[in-house]
Each structure stands twice: as C-alpha cells, then as structure tokens.
Amino acid sequence: MPDTKVTARGLNRATLARQLLLHRESSSAADAVRRVVALQAQEPASPYVALWNRVSDFDPADLDSAFATGDVVKATLIRVTLHAVHVGDYRAFREAMEPTLRAARLYDRRFAASGLTLDDADRVVPELVDYLAEPRSVTECATWLEQRVGASAVKGAWWAFRQYAPLLHVPAGGPWSFGTRRSFVAPRDKPIVPDTDVAEESMRVLAWRYLEGFGPASAADIAQFGMVHRPRARSALLALAGDLQRLEGPNGEELFDVPGALRPDEDTPAPPRLMAMWDSVLLAHADRSRVIPPDVRKSVMRMNGDVLPTLLVDGCVAGVWRTVEGRIEATAFHPLADEAWDGLAAEARALQELLAARGSDVYRRYHHWWAKLPDGEVRVLG
C-alpha cells in the first residue's frame, strides 16, 4: 500500500526543488548537471540558459570548461534528442536508451533506403566507434563510411549512425560551445550495445536517476521521459520496488520515489523563471499539468515538437518569452500580478546580461510561432 498521498501542488514543488528551481544553489556546472539528471541541448544555448536558471552566480565559462574537459557530455540520448549529461551518467543512460535508439534509427525508412541491413549496422557501428577514438569531422566520418558501405548508402547510413552509435559531440568553440560545424568522438567509457540484459540493468539506473531529479513519478512518467516502452519502465520499477517509496498521486495513481528525496511543503514559494526552450522540467512527465496548465499546453508545445521558451510563475507555465533587439519580450497568457511582473523583469535583466556576452538573438528562428499565440499581455522586460 502507498505510504502517503501527495497533492498536485506537492508534485510541482517536489519537481521544482529537485530541479533547483525553487532557489538557485551554489554549484559547479558539472555537479548541477548531475543534480538535474539531463539538460535538453538541441539548441546550443539551452544548457546555459537552463543552468543560469538553477545555479547562483552562474558563470557560462564553467559550463564551457565542463564540456571541454568531458565532465559534461552532449549526445543523442533521452527521447532520441540531444542532451547534456554528467559523464558519470552517460554510459548507463546510453545503454538504457539502446532499444529506443535502435528502433528509431535502424528501423527508419531513411536507413532502409540505404540498402543496408541490421547485420550491416552491427558490423559497421563498432568499427565507426573505434575510428572515432579521436575527434573527427562530419566530412571525415562520411569519407570513412563510404569506403565501407559504398557511396550510394552513405547518406542514409550516416543519418542513422550519427544518432544511433554511442558518439559524443565535440565542443567546437563559439558562444555556446557547439555550433553548426559538428565533430564527433567516441566516449571514454564505451557503452555495451546492443545487449538486452545490459539495457535492462541500465534501465533501472535511469529510472532511479530520473526519480532523483523528477520524482515522485509513475511508470508512465519514466516511459515518457525516455520515450521507452512502458513495460520496460514498469519492469525497472518492479526490480527497484524494495528500495523505493510508494505514494498515491492526486488522482489515486501509484507513484514511486527514492527515499529521503526533497518534497517541500506545497506552499513553498516558487519564484519567477525564464525557462530555456525544451527545458527538461517541461517534458519529463506523462501528465505535464504538473508544470504546464492544460489550457496553455498547445500554445507552448507545438505540433512539430518545438517547446517554446516559457515564463514560470508560481511554478507553472504562464506564458512565453523571446529576445527582440537584445531585450526580453514576455507574453503572459493570463493576467499576472504586479509582483510577478516585477520578478520576471528582474530575471530578464539578469538573462540579458548572460545573453549579451554570448549572443542575444537566441531562438530567433522560432519566432514564427509568435504569430500563432493566443492573445495575451505583452511586455518588454528589463
């Protein structure tokens, strides 16, 4: 039987606390990344904005250094998208994601069009990983691959292998460590793939780490976070059940949590925040009402998968923001109190300082979505 019941607001505050969003904490970039489990890194600026929201006196050079030394690595992982994770988590996370990554890339029509088979992939991928013992550019990888699979197969094969194979993105400099000119390298601690037993053992590690960063949560939440099949998530929780706390959710659902994890009082204040695109806190649960009210979900989560930069007010999404000529423009979907606007303005001034030193036009190519937003109050902050 569940040990206790947790309310919807209690779930919100628990997740915000573990994600360092109730108050910024003093931490190195690498330690903060490990605390929050995984940072969405599809856009190069996003891990920096994410840590700025979470770390007091955040210095972007600290994250530059963590990427350069390999203490934080960037790779295709969670939900088959780019994430930044602590190097100590990478191997288990990659092994846990193996079945999802394999299905998403090696069963895709673009790989099939190359004419290669799964057996071909299992032969070539380990060779590719060995070749990438040192950093190689996309051009070098394509040339190497052509020699093994032929010119006609390279396009489909490289599309699949660069995301399926256990490869890390190499920092290339520039304002946010990574740019459009990509290079890849093999991880120091190579994951064991493909191996079903290893994948399921590592799935238990991923489930535990997920609960540390996003719990309390259900099997459906874990499945959503990783885009893994629910039976795998349930099996992982069943294997861990003796070490986990069982809770009852606000709708009577069964939730799990790691013992001793943060669950602050539901009345704990949650300060305003300006969240990065695709911030993990917005995407980590099957029931996203924990952070995103149902009536605004379609406005911030577009049909093609884009998740706009959002305003958090009292711990929940209340609107979106973008940069306009170096200033932060905020659109609130419902009326906000003066105190909330004042808090957002203070956040905007600090964010503008971060962006001014690196590149103020972050997420500019997504501005077309603003024409499709519902009516709301628009203010230029800072």
Image (spheres, grey):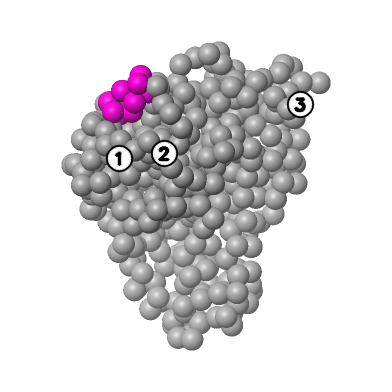
Determine contact: label 2, label 3, CB under 8 Å: no
- Horizontal side, residue 324 vs residue 304: left or right: left
On the image, numbered disc 2 is attached to which residue? 376
Mark 2, Cα crowd under 10 Å, few <14 / some 14-19 / many 20+, is few
On the image, numbered disc 1 is attached to which residue? 329
Point out the tag, 3 or 1, that comes first from the N-terminus. Answer: 3
Q: Which residues are magenta?
A: 338-347
Q: Main secondary structure of the magenta part?
A: helix
Mark 3, Cα crowd under 10 Å, few <14 / some 14-19 / many 20+, is few
Q: Which residue is drawn at the image coordinates 64% and 62% (left, top)?
A: 103
Quadrant in the rendering for residue 2: top right
Q: Position of residue 229 (x, y in %)?
A: 70, 50
Q: CA distance from mark 2 to mark 3?
A: 35 Å
Q: Which residue is drawn at the image coordinates 62% and 45% (left, top)?
A: 224
Q: Position of residue 287 (x, y in %)?
A: 63, 37
Q: Which residue is drawn at the image coordinates 53% and 72% (left, top)?
A: 124
Q: CA distance from mark 3 to mark 1?
A: 40 Å
Q: Tag 1's secondary structure?
A: strand
Point out the tag, 2 or 3, that comes first from the N-terminus. Answer: 3
On the image, numbered disc 3 is attached to which residue? 252
